[in-house]
Image: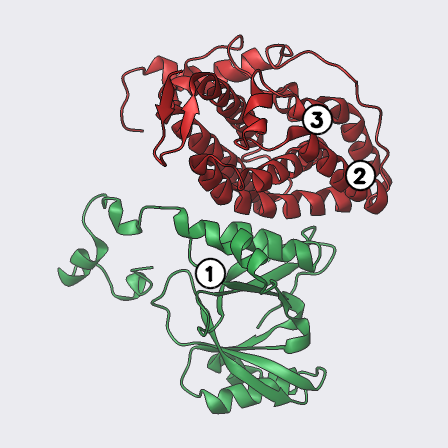
């Protein structure tokens, strides 16, 4: 569940979750977060932090206060999450299906009509029962990059010309963790996130 | 008259080639020096996100310098790394605007805004150059500059309309930087002939568009006051005392390892 720190302990600007679309027709995916003072600033910093190089055609930002997330375990211990209030309307639903991915965490899978955040979460749970986590937020909370050619050209097109080295380009110091696991030299649990 | 064949088949006369070489060098010099100043913020920007953003901007500017110097090399110029790391302050032809110390965040953002708007407008005009290799690199670089402008315009606006302190700092930065910014529109020797041939943009026209654009943003939108700009000022061969120490630091690694091939 998303919880903001109390204002007195947090001197940061609000945190915004960033959703990136790699290509037209593809789902927006949560890629991380930025701190920013207002919606246009959030989009600009998101572009700088998350799409200097990777392919993208669109960015969305949503303030963390507008996002409701839950894992199956959290719903078991805190069923009241399903009663979280909110404005009735269109809600986006995101799901996290696996831990074995780097750079993206949650895929947006579609929208639902809901009476509030809790209701949207309930619908997300029933549509996608077997996932690691759900995320919902109202359509009204989304700020988006423009889709005009000028924006796509100046925000996203330059990344296509930029080259960078993939992780596997760099050598591994010592022995690869997968090799150690196969040799029974490491416990599985400690390395469950390996491969990120 | 001797001519330099270009990769596109466009033929330049010898004087045109020399003037274009000089123009590409001064453009690259501005990019290199400003990129270094922005790089000085790495690890020191107000928040992590802006640290990354300014490093991105600096890398973009260095990339543009690379484009200019690579084109210059096809016209007989030296290797871009030699040009960047083995010339001293007497040979650099950057504006004084870009060599001034980075100052506070307002100073850095106002300078970057003045510079980005000038570069974006110049590059946009340069995409229509009759010299195809220049039109090509302008088309490539202008996309990034348009994004820079959005970022720095937003910051200048937030600072100017923010707190009394941020407004004071932003106005102070503009008051100091404005006279220096005019130097971005000083032509190089032989530029008039290149403009007449359609190879380079009309600098006076770009200057007029720039003045209009920045006045609308800084004065009309942000409520800042523009000071008077000097009608004449020294050329690009005159520097402040700040350039030499900058170059000393920027070039120190290259000069300690002149034979290095892989970084």
Q: Residue at x 49, y 13 (%)?
A: B248
Q: Tag 3's secondary structure?
A: helix
Q: Is residue A80 visible?
A: no
User: In the figure, the red chain has which letter?
Assistant: B
User: In the drawing, does residue B224 fall left or right of residue A63?
Assistant: right
User: In the figure, the green chain has which letter?
Assistant: A
Q: Residue furthest top?
A: B90
Q: Residue at x 64, y 33 (%)?
A: B115
Q: Position of residue A50 (x, y in %)?
A: 49, 54
Residue labelled with disc 2: B215
Tags 3 and 2 on a common chain? yes
Tags 1 and 3 on a common chain? no
Tags 1 and 2 on a common chain? no
In depth, the one of B227 and A125 nearer the eye is B227
Give the label on residue B2, or none. Answer: none
Q: Is residue A168 visible?
A: yes
Q: Residue at x 48, y 10 (%)?
A: B88
| Closer to the eye: label 1 or 3 | 3
Chain under callout 3:
B
A16 in relation to A11, above or below: below
Q: Residue furthest front?
A: B1
Residue labelled with disc 1: A56
Total labels: the figure holds 3
Disc 3 residue crowd, few under 14, some 14–19, many 20+, Cα 10 Å: some
User: In the drawing, does residue B120 fall left or right of residue B18?
Assistant: right
Residue labelled with disc 3: B181
In depth, the one of B150 and B18 nearer the eye is B18
Tell which circle, 3 or 2, labels the residue nearer the N-terminal end: 3
Disc 1 residue crowd, few under 14, some 14–19, many 20+, Cα 10 Å: many
Q: Position of residue B68 (x, y in %)?
A: 46, 30
């Amino acid at each position: 569940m998303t919880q903001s720190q109390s204002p007195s302990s947090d001197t940061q600007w609000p945190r915004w979750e960033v959703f990136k679309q790699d290509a037209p027709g593809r789902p927006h995916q949560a890629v991380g977060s930025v701190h920013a003072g207002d919606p246009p600033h959030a989009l600009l910093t998101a572009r700088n932090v998350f799409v200097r190089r990777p392919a993208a055609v669109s960015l969305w930002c949503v303030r963390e206060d507008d996002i409701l997330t839950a894992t199956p375990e959290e719903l078991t211990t805190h069923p009241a999450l399903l009663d979280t209030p909110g404005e009735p309307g269109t809600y986006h639903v995101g799901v996290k299906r696996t831990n074995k991915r780097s750079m993206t965490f949650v895929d947006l899978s579609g929208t639902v009509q809901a009476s509030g955040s809790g209701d949207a979460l309930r619908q997300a749970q029933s549509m996608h029962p077997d996932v690691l986590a759900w995320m919902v937020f109202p359509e009204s909370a989304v700020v988006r990059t423009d889709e005009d050619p000028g924006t796509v050209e100046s925000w996203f097109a330059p990344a296509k010309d930029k080259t960078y080295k993939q992780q596997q380009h760099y050598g591994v110091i010592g022995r690869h963790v997968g090799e150690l696991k196969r040799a029974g030299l490491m416990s599985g649990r400690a390395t469950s996130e390996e491969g990120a | 008259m001797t001519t330099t064949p270009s990769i596109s088949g466009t033929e330049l006369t010898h004087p045109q080639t020399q003037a274009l070489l000089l123009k590409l060098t001064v453009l690259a010099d501005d990019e290199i020096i400003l990129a270094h100043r922005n790089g000085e913020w790495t690890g020191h920007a107000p928040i992590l996100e802006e640290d990354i953003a300014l490093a991105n901007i600096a890398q973009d500017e260095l990339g543009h310098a690379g484009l200019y110097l690579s084109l210059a090399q096809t016209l007989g110029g030296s290797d871009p790394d030699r040009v960047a790391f083995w010339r001293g302050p007497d040979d650099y032809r950057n504006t004084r605007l870009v060599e001034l110390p980075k100052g506070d965040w307002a100073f850095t953002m106002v300078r970057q805004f003045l510079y980005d708007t000038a570069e974006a407008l110049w590059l946009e005009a340069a995409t229509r150059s009759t010299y195809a290799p220049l039109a090509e690199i302008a088309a490539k670089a202008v996309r990034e500059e348009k994004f820079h402008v959005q970022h720095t315009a937003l910051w200048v606006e937030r600072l100017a309309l923010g707190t009394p302190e941020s407004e004071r700092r932003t106005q102070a930065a503009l008051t100091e930087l404005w006279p220096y910014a005019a130097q971005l529109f000083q032509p190089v020797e032989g530029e008039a002939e290149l403009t007449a041939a359609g190879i380079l943009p009309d600098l006076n026209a770009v200057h007029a568009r720039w003045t209009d654009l920045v006045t609308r943003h800084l004065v009309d939108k942000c409520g800042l006051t523009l000071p008077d700009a000097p009608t004449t000022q020294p050329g690009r061969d005159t520097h402040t005392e700040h350039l030499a120490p900058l170059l000393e630091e920027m070039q120190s690694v290259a000069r300690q390892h002149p034979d290095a091939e892989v970084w």
